[in-house]
Image (cartoon, helix red, strand yellow):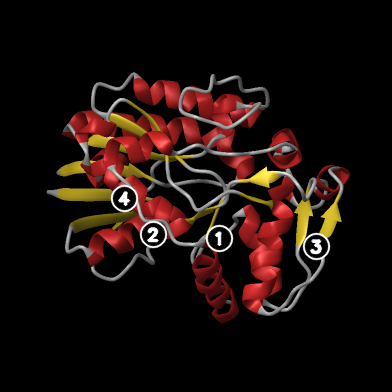
Amino acid sequence: MTVVVLGAGRGIGREITRQLVAEGRRVRAVTRSGGVPEGAQDVRADLMDRAATVEAVRGASVIHLAANVPYTSWVDMLPTISGNVIVGAETVGAKLVLADNLYAYGPVSGPITEETPERPVGPKEKLRSTLGKRLRQASVPIVLSRSSDYYGPGGVGSLPGELVLKPLARGKQPMWFGPLDVPHTFAYLADTARAQIVLGDDARADGRSWHTPAAETLSVRDFIGLVGRVVGNARKPLRLPRSTVTVGALFDKRLRGMGELGHQQSKPWVVDHSAFEKTFGPLPVTPHEKAVRRTAEWYRTTA
């Protein structure tokens, strides 16, 4: 049986591919430009092209949709990509697992569980909620694998990675948007990938969303302090006001659209993954200290 990973060249898709290959599984790694883990079948396809997408997933038993696009292209590209992948999954009769985030819930009060109502407010939150609903209407088994902010080797563009781990690992000062003493769940990329593989392999996961396990929730200040101790560069974080995002977006398109997500940094963002462990058993997660050490080493050796 073939497992197809869409978006296998970076981030969560690459890590899912790497772990599947390490298990000796038959993996087709689909990207637009290559650069996939050794041992996977390297297939090039543009997921904006329906025919190319269907051909890329032909013969799949499970499809992991981990492809993503820049914030500024979400509205223009994600509906088309997800629509093409749904058609591909239905054409070949494959289970579809989406590497999802928590945006669909919108602003929340209290710990986030899979039963938390989806009340999206901003455009990106509404888009993620709509995409999830669209997937649930597919005629094949689907799973939404939802993770909080993750960090780890290969986690390019992640908030904790870019603002905290990368600068501290390279001897610079960390930054954060929002209060430092609010709790925030940070996940490790390899653990998130492992959880998604479990969801793809187990029929009990079908038809709903799941929160992937992560190490203990810390305050942002404590997380930054832990990173500083591990990498030997304990520095006081630079607290950036929310206005920085608004002004910065005028010059850096990567910041455009982040303003609507400010509640994720200004209020407690605590993710409950107990449903996963009650159903599939405990998933050994990497302690933050070990995960930070591995991630810092990756940043130090990556240009």
Mark 1 vs 4, N-terminal side: 4
Give the residue at x 31% y 50%.
Answer: 5
Judge depth for marks 3 and 2 and give the one in front.
Answer: 3
As helix, strand or loop, the secondary structure at mark 4 comes to strand
Mark 1 vs 2, N-terminal side: 2
Residue 5's disc number: 4
Give left or right: position of 122 versus 297: right
Can you say whether 238 is above or below 195 in the image?
Answer: below
State the residue in front, 121 or 283: 283
As helix, strand or loop, the secondary structure at mark 1 comes to loop
* Residue 90 shows in the view: yes
**Residue type marked 1:** Val
Answer with the quarter of the image where residue 117 lies: top right
Mark 2 vs 4, N-terminal side: 4
Mark 3 vs 2, N-terminal side: 2
As helix, strand or loop, the secondary structure at mark 2 comes to helix
* Residue 49 shows in the view: no
Q: Give the distance between the C-alpha atoms of the residues marked 3 and 4, in whole angstroms.
A: 37 Å
Mark 1 vs 3, N-terminal side: 1
Image quadrant for the C terminus?
Answer: bottom right
Judge depth for marks 3 and 4 and give the one in front.
Answer: 3
Q: Provide the residue designation for mark 3.
A: 237
Q: Residues within 10 Å of mark 4 (few under 14, many from 20)?
A: many
As helix, strand or loop, the secondary structure at mark 3 comes to loop
Q: Residue furthest left?
A: 1
Give the residue at x 85% y 48%.
Answer: 244
Q: Provide the residue designation for mark 1.
A: 156
Q: Position of residue 129 (x, y in %)?
A: 52, 25
Q: Position of residue 164 (x, y in %)?
A: 69, 63
The reply to whether discs 1 and 2 touch (Cβ–Cβ < 8 Å) is no
Q: Provide the residue designation for mark 2.
A: 14
**Residue type marked 2:** Arg
